[in-house]
Amino acid sequence: MNAHAISPTDVRVADVRPPISRLTRVELRKMVDTRSGFWLLLAVAAMTVLVVVITLIAGHEDDFTFRNIFGNALVPAGILLPVVGILLVTSEWSQRTALVSFALVPGRARLIAAKVLAGAVLGLIATVVAAIVAAIGTALASPDIAHVWTFPVGLVGQDLIYAVSAMTVGVAFGAALQASAPAIVLYFALPTAIGALESIKSIHGTVEWFSSGSFEWLTQNVLSGHEWAQVLVALLLWMVLPLAIGLWRITGRDLS
Amino acid sequence: MIEAEKLTKRFAGRAVVDDVSFRCEPGTVTGFLGPNGAGKTTTMRMICGFARPDAGSSAVLGGEYRRLPNPGRRVGVLLDASAQHGGRRGREVLAISAQTMGVDEARADEMLGLVGLDKSAARKRVRQYSLGMRQRLGIANALIGEPEVLILDEPANGLDPEGMRWMRSLLRDFAERGGTVLLSSHLLHEVDVIADRLVIIGSGKIVAEGTRDELLSHAGALVRAADTDGLAKALAAAGLEAREAEGEGLLVDADPAAVGIAARDAGIALTHLAPAGDAGLEQLFFDLTSGEEAAK
């Protein structure tokens, strides 16, 4: 037995709080180092490639602009990354690792903040990957049309906001519900339910204010002020509210 | 150093931990003993900041656990060996903890060696681990930050006799270097093998506390005579409470000197008279905690 290995009396130089940057790196690592996390992310990457390939095979050459292909390439990430975000939080309960994670980081809000940040980083990475895949696809297709590589600067920011907020919504749902199945089901069922409301005449036109469908606009066109307002209100409802509920549940209660 | 001061926790109005106070000093291994449901886990989770006490307080190394800036470097915690992500490899579990607390990841390999998990076990997903392997991984995880204090909930559960001896020497060694250990168990035998101090809990209350010898001094005497009936009468006449200890003689609720005097006064020849030992400790544990069992 190595005597140093369990010496409890060493002079401690590392008795400082782990910085949030390190906690974020740990959370990023936790997304990919489990079997389910690894395959889920691989599936997102594979589907991104697949979507671009299908677009090029089945689409019309007139539509083969980088802007169009990139818009399609972002769809798999937009659908599946929130699930990664949900699992990043709920697995702490379903796999009961909360007993280890919160023992090492007793500041519970800091751990959740690290998860949100890790989600944001993954969202950025996914956007960059989608852009690269779309660029390769566009170059391979090299369509004989005008404005192939034209891309509004405003849309770059919007795409990033889209990917990051999609991840954060996932983390927020996971934090609010703390159970994988209900969080995933609600995440996909609620938008459909709200979409159904649109058919009700009296509230037609107001649904955009609280429908997560409004987020899709971010990847389509540079938004007007009115549309921005609608997206922000929807984000308040879909991202900020569940995150607040999650923080309240996790920091204010006993963990088990 | 671990201190619990009048810790109380109620669930639905019922106190599952009731006014629990004890101290674990550096250099000692304290066994927290009680039947399942007696409040051991709840107490330990309060100490580690997972549950908030309804009354009382606890301190680890002189302050609240939650106030420790980087707890992994000061306190090694194992609250549930099966609380690990099944899809994660054994070594990766340790690597994540090392990275979180800012310890060199090479410590993960060092700890795997220390707890006897070989290379093939390190590569396996935790889902494939037996309970004994999970316990070893959990101990490795608790030790990775070179802590001064260990808090382990049922760490011997699932270990074979060889594993228990291993844990005993590991924790002894840790305590001899000045470390503080608190470990819980629902089995007297486990705690008796591993710990040098006992805190016994039943129905949420501390019912006894002390070293093995201190507890045994209250455990009475074990006495045998050729004339068992005569001995029983003599003890009854002296006002001493005695009962049959299966095949071993009579277990008397008094110290051996009082038993000897009673026997002498009645002219009974003894063939054996000694502190009650293991039989007494078991009886004591059963008596102290039987209220809990009966209440179920």
Image: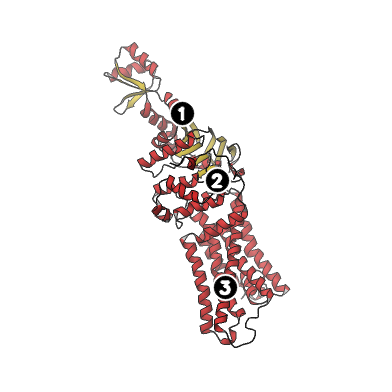
Q: Position of residue B102 (x, y in %)?
A: 56, 50
Q: CA distance from mark 1 to mark 2?
A: 29 Å
Q: Is residue B196 visible?
A: yes
Front-most of residues B246 and A7: A7
| Residue A200 horizontal/vertical position (percent) | 63, 74
Residue A138: which quarter of the image?
bottom right
Could you confirm whether marks 2 and 3 are on the same chain?
Answer: no
Q: Chain of mark 2?
A: B
Query: CB atoms at circles 1 and 2 under 8 Å apart?
Result: no
Label at residue B49: none
In whole angstroms, how far apart are the C-alphas of marks 1 and 3? 65 Å
The amino acid sitting under disc 3 is Ala
Q: Amino acid at mark 2?
A: Gly
> Are dots 1 and 3 on a single chain?
no
- In the image as oriented, which residue stretches furthest toward the bottom? A144
- Residue located beneath label 1 in the image: B211
Q: Earlier in the sequence, mark 1 or mark 2?
A: 2
Q: Is residue B221 left or right of residue A95?
A: left
Amino acid of disc 1: Thr
Residue B228: image quadrant is top left
Residue at image x 57%, y 45%?
B71
Disc 2 element = helix
- The CA distance from mark 2 to mark 3 is 39 Å
Residue marked by disc 3: A130
Q: Is residue B125 above or below residue A63?
A: above
Report x, y in % for residue A58: 51, 84
Residue labelled with disc 2: B72
